[in-house]
Image (cartoon, rainbow, N blue to C red):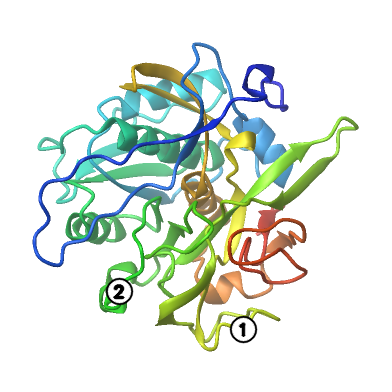
Amino acid sequence: MNKHLPALFGVLAVVALALPATAAASPGERYAHHPLRVRSLASLSVVGLSPSTIKGAYGFSTAASAGTGKTIAIVDAYNDPTAESDLGTFSSTFGLPPCTTANGCFLKVNQNGNTRSLPGTDAGWALEIALDVEWAHAIAPGAKILLVEARSSSLSNLFAAEDYAKAHAQYVSNSWGASEFSSEHSYDGHFTQTGVSFFASSGDGGSQLWPSTSPNVISVGGTTLTFNSDGSLTETGWSGSGGGCSAYETANTAQVTDSVNCNGKRATPDVSLDADPNSGVSVYDSTPYSGSAGWWQVGGTSASSPMWAARSADAGVPVNSAYVYGSSITYRDITIGSNNVGSCKPGYDLVTGRGSWTGLTP
């Protein structure tokens, strides 16, 4: 498809998906939301940036075998009843290899690993799941996809899903988060496992979310891609990219924030990729949301997290804080743009972190 944004979306407003209703919370229970943004409602024809356009923008591998031998776990809440069939439509449309239960590429389970007793359906989370699954497959078409669906968006249920995911995958993507809270550090252990890399959306409100603020995860922020008339590409910091200095989490020793001073607290994000819904990616979802189903143009750091997890699977190595702040990754340093807490600058910043992963190596 044309790498430029479809004309019909030129001036449409960005729509924030409504959060699902939840059961009455038990004392101390907290709930997460998905940082996902769409441009208007769905279309019958393809809209948004294609996998080939995103891979071209970042110089990622176009090989169908990229990610072979690795498993990417997607942790989300509620059930997307059409996740596998929608992935099939997405894959066939963009020339990606099939990823199905039958061929062993795709598996959907509940938070306990059961394939039968799946959660109830929530339309907003179903679109989130479609985004995460399809774009993990788009960037790492050779990897297996494990979709772990939590019973609800409560943190306790998401923790159970996380614990199952990290025991069965090398890369875990979390496109969800909650406002920071004073005891959050006591739950950071859910994001540790030898040999497993954890990624979390940094948020879409310009300020930070947990678990993105956990020092155990790679916090993934967002950028805007602009395709210029002369064929060149400009990447800038997205105004909605979550970031800031954590109120409660201490930075780990690997994090290097250059001129940004968080007084020993965790700074987010670590890194970024495309997340602005104005340069949003193409997603197919046949589970109706607000009476609309089909092709969506989707952004938010919900998009950049699974893409970072998948690019890490392509590399085939554990991607932790030491790796991100080391010298193995070639970054595009984002120096233009701002969010609610700061502006982009050379080196590390609170909008895009170190910047965007580019190139085929590692």
Q: Residues within 10 Å of mark 1 (few under 14, many from 20)?
A: few
On the question of residue 275 being in view, the answer is yes
- Residue at 74 percent across and 48 percent down: it is 235
Find disc 1 in the rendering and name its residue: 261
Find disc 2 in the rendering and name its residue: 184
The percent coordinates of residue 334 (x first, y second) are 74, 59
Label 2 element class? helix
Between marks 1 and 2, how big is the CA–CA gap? 22 Å
Report the side of 238 relative to 296 (left or right): right
The percent coordinates of residue 324 (x first, y second) are 59, 69
Three-letter residue code for mark 1: Asn
The answer to the question of whether label 1 and label 2 lie on touching residues, with beta carbons closer than 8 A, is no
- Residue 177 quadrant: bottom left
Does residue 44 lie above or below 23 as drawn? above
On the question of residue 142 being in view, the answer is no
Numbered label tally: 2
Say which quadrant the C terminus sits in: bottom right
Looking at the image, which residue sits at the far top? Answer: 44
The percent coordinates of residue 170 (x first, y second) are 39, 58
Say which quadrant the N terminus sits in: top right
- Residue at 70 percent across and 53 percent down: it is 358
Does residue 107 lie above or below 291 as drawn? below
Report the side of 113 relative to 351 (left or right): left
- Residue at 62 percent across and 66 percent down: it is 353
Mark number for residue 344?
Answer: none
Report the side of 304 relative to 31 (left or right): right
Three-letter residue code for mark 2: Glu
Label 1 element class? loop
Q: Residues within 10 Å of mark 2 (few under 14, many from 20)?
A: some
- Residue 132 quadrant: top left
The percent coordinates of residue 109 (x first, y second) are 21, 42
Q: Nearer the viewer, residue 54 or 60?
A: 54
